[in-house]
Amino acid sequence: MTDLLSLAYPWTKAFHIIAVISWMAGIFYLPRLFVHHVEQKGGNDPVFEMMEEKLFRVIMNPAMIATWVFGLCLVFTPGIVDWGSAWPWIKAAGVLGMTWFHHWLGRRRKELAAGRNTVNGRQYRLMNEVPTVLMVVIVIAVVVRF
């Protein structure tokens, strides 16, 4: 199995990067949709709800799953991760944080659709900075490998 992972390494890495980019695009965009949704006059809008649901279910969920699958394949590829270094632990914490944020967005989407939103536009704008900070931490940990 490890021989197969080693042979597939460039492809696995490529698909991991593609999945991460797709996931991050959704994670950056969905809170912006929430801002516009909650700040519009008249409350719930079926167009916003449809856009939010499709972004979350059709793009973000599959991209998150693919990110995890290809990422775990990279973790199990021999010689790729040095668990004696700090960087894989920092990256793992960042990815867990990003996954928590993904699910937080999913709960907010369901609340908006049900008309039970408790978060205002300013709070969504502030929360939109969370994935940016996590992304910076993850990229620096992986590239610098301290």
Image: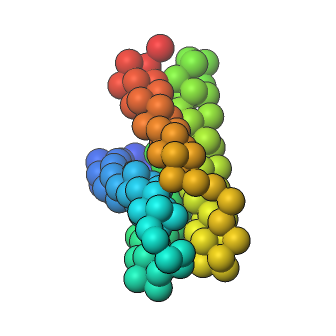
Q: Nearer the viewer, residue 100 or 146?
A: 100
Percent x, y of residue 103: 63, 59
The type of colouring in the image is rainbow
Seen at 62% across and 34% down, the residue is 93
The picture quadrant where one finds residue 8 is bottom left
Q: Nearer the viewer, residue 91 or 23?
A: 23
Residue 138 visible in the current orientation: no
Percent x, y of residue 69: 52, 58
Seen at 43% across and 19% down, the residue is 145
Vertical arrangement, residue 82 with respect to residue 77, above or below: above
Vertical arrangement, residue 113 with respect to residue 14, above or below: below
Seen at 47% across and 32% down, the residue is 133
Residue 117 as seen in the image, left or right of residue 61: right
Seen at 52% across and 46% down, the residue is 122
Residue 93 visible in the current orientation: yes
Percent x, y of residue 64: 50, 60
Q: Nearer the viewer, residue 130 or 115?
A: 115
Vertical arrangement, residue 44 with respect to residue 96, above or below: below
Percent x, y of residue 110: 64, 73
